[in-house]
Amino acid sequence: MTNLLKAILTVLSFIALPSLVSAEDILSITNGDVTVELTKADVAKLEQTAFETTTIWTEGKIEFSGPTLKSILELANITEGVVSLTAINDYTIEIPVADITEEAPIVANLMNGEPFNRREKGPYWVVYPFDADKKYQQEEVYALSIWQLSSILKNPEE
């Protein structure tokens, strides 16, 4: 009886696990009444930008890749104003859309070609190419490098 119970629980855990994991992997972008929800598969299908850089939170050079933040904002027709980015733990930062370029930052979904989990700052991490330019090596930019990103909200115009 114990082996049968273990087998049933194992099967049930495999059935429930995908829904639990996918809920954590959703990236939500909201612009007024419009909300776009992206799964990890959706993010992976977007055009990817990659660069190698060091960070103040990791050791050695890492190749980060993912879509640009600008391209993700455009999915919800966000082209101006200020956006709030929120992490899984409710840490929130604000970035003027005018400060977001075609090159930086990216919403990294891969580190060294592999997906990364919450313990590794995933599944989404806003990363700048810190080594590419001194302008990215400032406390203000480091503060914008939010990890475990879960949602983006266009702030209402005041």
Image (spheres, rainbow, N blue to C red):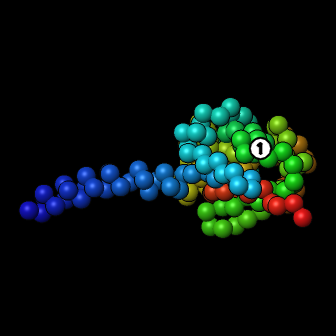
Q: Outermost residue, left direction?
A: 1
Q: How many marks?
A: 1
- Name the residue tied to disc 1: 77
Left or right of 106? Residue 140 is right
Query: Which residue lies most toward the front here?
Result: 33
Question: Which x, y percent locates residue 129?
Answer: 79, 43
Instruction: State the residue lying farthest toward the bottom.
Output: 90
Indicate left or right for 157 with 111 as reference. Answer: right
14 lies left or right of 72: left
At horizontal 85% and vertical 41% (from top left) the residue drawn is 101
Vertical side of 43 occupied by 35: above or below: below
Return the x and y of residue 153 as percentages of the image width and height: 73, 57
Q: Is residue 4 left or right of residue 121?
A: left
Residue 2: % across, % down: 12, 63
- Across and down, in percent, residue 89 comes to 62, 67
For the point 90% across and 64% down, the residue is 158
Q: Quadrant of the N terminus?
A: bottom left
Residue 41 in the image: above or below residue 153 = above
The foreground one among 95 and 6 is 95
In this orientation, does residue 129 appear? Answer: no
Instruction: Rate crowding at label 1 as few (under 14), some (14 to 19) or many (20 or more) other CA atoms within 10 Å.
Output: some
